[in-house]
Amino acid sequence: MQREARSSGATPLILTTAVYYAPNVNRVNHPIQAIAKSLDWINLMAYDFSGPTRSTVTNSPAALYDPSSQVSGSYGIRAWIQASLSANKLVFRIPFYGYAWHLMNANNHGLLAPANGPVGSTDGSMRYQQITKFIT
């Protein structure tokens, strides 16, 4: 692409892809060497780890760090780097949305609180603009 841009006088393009937060998720075998050679950036989708339609307890949909699990953004970054992908090609994607859970007990509202489904929409999702209304 860069050669074509130079020869045609066109603006060089950037070639990217979006991948799971870690190279070993869902038994997907990413061609890591081909990715490293061919792409400018690799966007790590470090979100949708949890949600009220998939769990009976509240949890972070985009945990940056979770010492008890491999489901976190920090684990994903380390896993891609250990799989020989250069850190300067990684783009860490985070969500600008969240989820609303129907709590089993309103007094128990922290992480891993028992819940029985979503609130506010079919899947419980809330846009950033909606979430900011709860922050004062």
Image: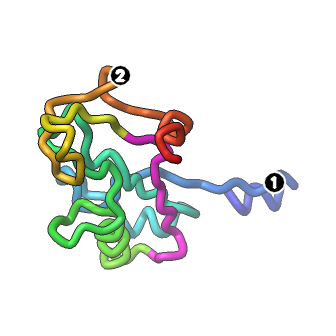
Residue beneath label 1, please?
Answer: 11
Residue beneath label 2, please?
Answer: 121
x then y, percent, for residue 84: 37, 77
128 and 7: which one is in front?
A: 128
Q: Is residue 91 left or right of residue 107?
A: right
Q: Which of the 4 image quarters holds residue 82?
A: bottom left
Question: Coloring scheme of the render?
Answer: rainbow
In the picture as drawn, the residue positioned furthest to the front comes out as 107
Q: Nearer the viewer, mark 1 or mark 2?
A: 2
Q: Amino acid at mark 2?
A: Ser
In the structure shown, which secondary structural element does the residue marked by tag 2 occupy? loop
Residue at 38% across / 32% down in the picture?
125
Q: Amino acid at mark 1?
A: Thr
The magenta span reads 86-98
Q: Which of the 4 image quarters holds residue 14?
A: bottom right
49 and 10: which one is in front?
A: 49
Residue at 32% across / 59% down in the picture?
63
Q: Which of the 4 image quarters holds residue 77?
A: bottom left
x then y, percent, for residue 117: 19, 29
In the structure shown, which secondary structural element does the residue marked by tag 1 occupy? loop
Q: Look at the image and say whether residue 105 sits in the magenta stretch.
A: no
